[in-house]
Image (cartoon, rainbow, N blue to C red):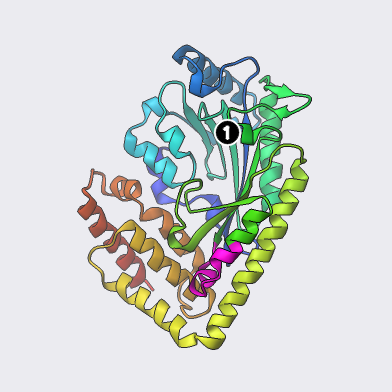
Amino acid sequence: MTLDGFLKRHGGWLEAGPEEGPVISSRIRLARNLRETTFPGWASKEVRNRVWSEVLLAFDGVEDSKSFLRWRMDELSALDRELLFERHLISRELAERQTGSGVFVNEDECRAVMVNEEDHIRLQSLQPGLNLQKAWDIADELDNALEKSLSYAFSSKLGYLTACPSNVGTGLRASVMLHLPGLVLTEEIKPVINAVSKIGLAVRGLWGEGSEASGHMFQISNQITLGKPEAEIIAHLEQIVLEVIEHEKNARLRLMGKQEIRVHDHVGRAYGILANAALMTTGEALDLLSALRLGVDLGLLPNMVRREIDQLFIRIHPAHLQKEAGAALSPEERDIKRAQLIRKFLDGK
């Protein structure tokens, strides 16, 4: 399958999963580096190419290596790199790198390994819904398979050594993507974020660090990787996420109990705009689709399926629209195509 093939399908992490109402997906990311090898940010082109070759060779020893697609960043167009970013398969930083950088992605898009990003290896496992343990088991298995052929930079005192000190230790970053419109509409989101931040967790937007919570999407992740075992990090994050889910569910109940007409208006207005607009920016589309997703969860839109809306959250982004059109599009042309795509989706409902 080529990159163009991604347009005809969605990642396996967008299927139905545990606690799927407020929860989109769970992710485990592991940072690893090769022993006695300069970190990517300071490495020469020769070193970066050597790292790519070593990781490529290690993948040949992975049991299901043939299920992974492989791309080097310097062999992809800017549009293709953006497409991978929009599908949450690579970071913005990797999309901007060139020599020796690349990614391995399995066909269901639930596993990805970035090479020569901030670290030599960034291994990612994605699962639908709240399923951190399964995501960890899959990531750990792939990590062990690669380590059979690679010598990792490891300290008996500190753990895995990484380019950024905040990742030293387990090198583990666990995160859960949540849809929290109830907390936003009741104006309770800030206290929740503040409370979560005070206990050592980070709350970020749709695209991770430095991004805004477009479409009322929030990522909650651990910040501490040193001095705690992986199982403890994952269990703590899951416990807090379950508490946030309860807050979100209670916020939705209060909205329907005290402000039901406001909720109907919020969802109905979103539907009306999406069904009739001729122009639609990415930000506006995300916020309006968020209202539709809330409407589905509350039973106000019985003919819609939640995961179809989740897939639209991906398809409406610029690179996807341009790949589907088969041509570069101006911002206004993208806004037209985005509006057409959403109207077509709603026409089928």
Which quadrant holds residue 248?
bottom right
Q: Is residue 187 magenta?
A: yes
Classify residue 345 by image quadrant.
Answer: bottom left
> Is residue 16 among the parts visible in the rendering?
no
* Viewer-nearest residue: 244 or 15: 244
Query: What's the residue type where badge 1 is placed?
Result: Arg
Q: Residue at x 34, y 57 (%)?
A: 282
Residue extent of the magenta highlight: 179-192
State the image coordinates of residue 19 (x, y, percent, origin top left).
64, 64
Chief secondary structure of the magenta span?
A: helix
The residue that appears at 36% across and 56% down in the rendered structure is 316
The location of residue 43, given as percent across then percent down, is: 50, 17
- Give the vertical position of 208 relative to 242 (above or below): above
Indicate left or right for 218 with 151 as reference. Answer: left
Q: Indicate left or right for 147 with 84 as reference.
A: right
* Above or below, comparing residue 17 to residue 60 in the picture: below
- Height in image: 222 above or below 311? above
**Up-down: is 282 above or below 226?**
below
Q: Position of residue 160 (x, y in %)?
A: 69, 28
The image shows a total of numbered marks equal to 1
Mark 1 highlights which residue? Answer: 122
Regarding residue 205, the answer to whether it shows in the image is yes
